[in-house]
Image: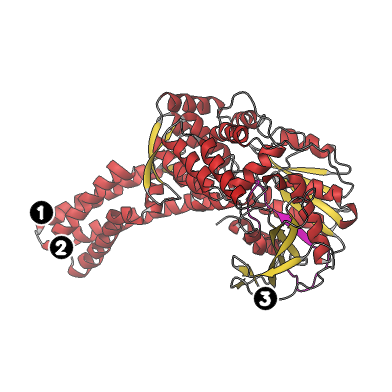
Amino acid sequence: MITRVALALALVSSPSTLPAALPAAQAVTEAVAEVVTDDVTGAAAGADSGPFAGAGAGAVPVEERACPVEMPAGTRCGFLVAPERRDGDQAKTVRVGFAVHKASNPAGDPVVYMSGGPASSSIQLTGYLASIFPDRDVVTLEQRGSRYSKPTLGCPETVSAMLDRLRAPRADVARGALDCRRRHEEQGVDLRGYTTKEIAADVVDLRKALGYARWNLFGVSYSTRVTVDAAAADPEGVSAVALDSFLPQDVSWYGDADRNLADTVAALGIGDRFEAMVRRLNARPAQVPTTDPLTGKAFTARLTGDDVATVLAEGLHDASVIAAAPALVDALAEGHDELLRPLADQAGPGLASHEFGLYHAVQCQDEAVFPERSRLFTVTSDKEVCAAWKLPASVPTKATTKAPVLVLGGQYDPTTPVRTARPAAGKLPGARFVEFAGVGHAVFLSTACGARTIAAFFADPAGWKQPCDPSQRGFAPVRPGDLHVTGAPYQVLTSPWLAAPLALFALASLAQLVGGALRGRALTAFAGLAGAAFVGVAADAVWGLMKENETALAVGVPRTLEAYGWIAVGSAVLTVAALLRARTIPNILATVIAAGLLVWWWSWFL
């Protein structure tokens, strides 16, 4: 929807479900800063380079590197040099990216964080995490094969094929994935070395290489599996574990996908309208203009109901989308296909933000059990890719840990639901579970209370007490009828020139008000006053909605704007009256501008 959703979800989510539409974590960062503050300032990429203080002399070395993204002061970046396959040729290595932010006065064990996916990046969150844990070193660790590791297992061939599926339903995703695999293998990549087991071993080796005696593990979504494995493999090196949006080892990622989405829309009270939307668009797919993120060229996406369900399954990770979902789904069920443009615009960049070579290497080895049928095109695409790649399935393990564990879950999480996360947490010795109301996936990015909860837990795992109320929702639900449904606000936000008629009307109204008052022309002055009042109250109503939930603007505008439009009509009538009294060039221009505004307002914006 609006931009801050896409970024947040790209950091933590699986590309098997697509990012929707949010400055990710900015609002949460500001709220957390009220409780935990730090002098985290911007620095150029690669700042503060130099040897890693306290680096261990273990068998697995680390290398210094320039930070690939902007980092807070006090941060250094590097590579962990690890065997590509620990069960194979030890001389063949990969470089796993990481960043270390040193606390000014550390008062506790470090926190190491990894994003989800598989194949999501982590180190761009270093500054945000440093604001949550100001009195600890923060280590952000990439997954081997991800964007900031070497080799990077990107698959533009797979992305292109999946985008082709939005153009034509019979596009061959498996062929694109095979082309990608062939290219990586020609470059010497052994995909069998990219599994959860190897990624977890990287976590353990990095602690030893950096010389930390103990640290706290923090995982989200897919990386909660990595985190539990790492804690089990390194019990003496782990102080505590935080699992946000827990994906238990024994849960079927693909087998549960359709049920998880159905449960979420049912819990939101929109199950019937959701199915009505899917049926309508499956019968008559929508043609939606969008842009190919690989080529930058415009194309028309063909979106079925199942396609929209797939994209919404990812959108519902975010709390602002959850709040707007009742109004959005109802409007789509009624035929408002113009609301699909934001979803289509975010689907492509969401696909391009992940490294599909890594993603499918992990999924096809660790999660290669698929349902016979699924409505979600990402599940069916992954099934085709794994059937074509024919990678050997990993041997399943049942890892656990004796370290203190905190598990966080979102009430409406459509990927790692409370239904599976809570009982799985109960099987971990001494684990505590907290559910957050109104939240979807990645709690710590969705609510300041989630971030504070994790910080308080790491501060005192044994005596931890909940520092805030997890039952408090961050966004009020937007129900059908709350908004006047229109896709115009999203188009204006993406192409501001479309608001030119309103801007011209505002300038003309001010000129009428000032000019009429100075020259003693009452009709002109009152026309300008009415026009300025219209612009003011309309802008105030839209701004109020943006402050409450900017994603709701992708659905529509406050219904009060329907009434406010009549103020603009009154201004236009007064302007015509002034023109009839004095046919001057300013009055003619004001009349033309007012007429254009009314056409724009009633026939397009509303």
Of the two numbered discs 1 and 2 in the rendering, the one whose residue sits closer to the viewer: 2
Label whose residue precedes the other's in the sequence (2 or 3):
3
Residue depicted at 49% across the width and 27% down the height: 278
Q: Main secondary structure of the magenta part?
A: loop
Q: Which residues are magenta?
A: 101-122
Which quarter of the figure has residue 99? bottom right
State the residue in front, 70 or 599.
70
Look at the image and say whether residue 149 sits in the magenta stretch: no
Taking the spot 47% from the left edge, 24% from the top edge, the residue there is 279
- The three-letter code of the residue at mark 2 reads Pro
- The residue that appears at 47% across and 31% down in the rendered structure is 330
Q: Residues within 10 Å of mark 2 (few under 14, many from 20)?
A: some
Q: Is residue 256 at least partly visible in the picture?
A: yes
Indicate the secondary structure of the residue bearing disc 1.
helix
Q: Callout 3, which amino acid? A: Asp
**Which comes before the other along the chain, label 1 or label 2?**
1
Residue 112 — which label?
none
Measured Cα–Cα span from mark 3 to mark 1: 71 Å
Residue denoted by label 2: 586
Q: Nearer the viewer, residue 533 or 366?
A: 366
Image quadrant holding the C terminus, namely: top left
What percent of the width, then of the height, locates residue 44? 58, 73
Q: Rounded to the nearest whole Å, what is the CA distance between mark 1 and mark 2?
A: 12 Å
User: Looking at the picture, does residue 391 appear above or below residue 183?
Assistant: above
On the image, numbered disc 3 is attached to which residue? 48
In space, the residues marked 2 and 3 are separated at their CA atoms by: 61 Å
Is 154 placed left or right of 231 in the picture? left
